[in-house]
Amino acid sequence: MTLQSEENFKRIVQFKIRLTLKEKQIISTKAKDEKYNSISDYARERLLKERLTKRITVSDDYIRIFKTMDYNLTKIGTNLNQVAHKLNAYNTYMLTEQDQQTFKDCFEILKDCYALLGQYLRKIK
């Protein structure tokens, strides 16, 4: 007899929860998809397993600074869009290849900054 099967025989305490039929169906599907033998094994693993995620706590000043940076980056992006729109609308100035590349580089950097800020803001809310 393996240690795992010995542990199964020692389990004498029952823990009940009430679910809707839909909730039970979702849990059953997840247990099957993740190749668990039973819902009990799935629930035990999910509830007792140490979580690797950590909650980040920061000061109110840090949150304020991050939100200000987020706002300012959004403003810069909006201004760049307005410049691009006006350049496209009025054909008085033709962008050089270098101008176009500069706009593309700015856009990519802004996009990366915005995505990174969004990722961290979700963690600290």
Image (spheres, rainbow, N blue to C red):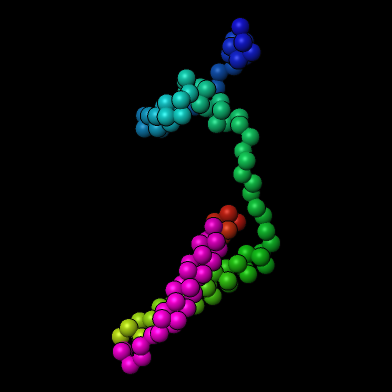
**Considering only vertical position in the picture, is 106 above or below 42?**
below
| Residue situated furthest top in the rendering | 1
Residue at 38% in and 85% down:
95
Residue at 67% in and 55% down:
57
Instruction: Choose between 123 and 85: the one closer to the eye.
Output: 85
Where residue 31 sits, quadrant-wise, is top left
User: Residue 73, percent across and down?
Assistant: 52, 73
Q: How many marks?
A: 0
Residue 91 part of the magenta-drawn span: yes
Instruction: Choose between 2 and 102: the one closer to the eye.
Output: 102
| Residue situated furthest bottom in the rendering | 92
Residue 5 part of the magenta-drawn span: no
Q: Is residue 17 left or right of residue 89?
A: right
Is residue 76 visible in this depiction of the protein? yes
Q: Is residue 20 left or right of residue 89?
A: right
User: Residue 76, percent across and down?
Assistant: 49, 77
User: Residue 78, percent across and down?
Assistant: 44, 77
**Considering only vertical position in the picture, is 78 above or below 47?**
below
**Considering only vertical position in the picture, is 9 above or below 15?**
above
Q: Magenta-highlighted stretch: main secondary structure?
A: helix
Is residue 27 visible in this depiction of the protein? no
Q: Start and end of the magenta stretch?
A: 90-119
User: Residue 113, percent across and down?
Assistant: 54, 66
Residue at 36% in and 32% down:
22
Instruction: Choose between 57 and 113: the one closer to the eye.
Output: 113
Where residue 116 sits, quadrant-wise, is bottom right
Q: Is residue 109 left or right of residue 32?
A: right
Quadrant containing the N terminus in the rendered view:
top right
Quadrant containing the C terminus in the rendered view:
bottom right
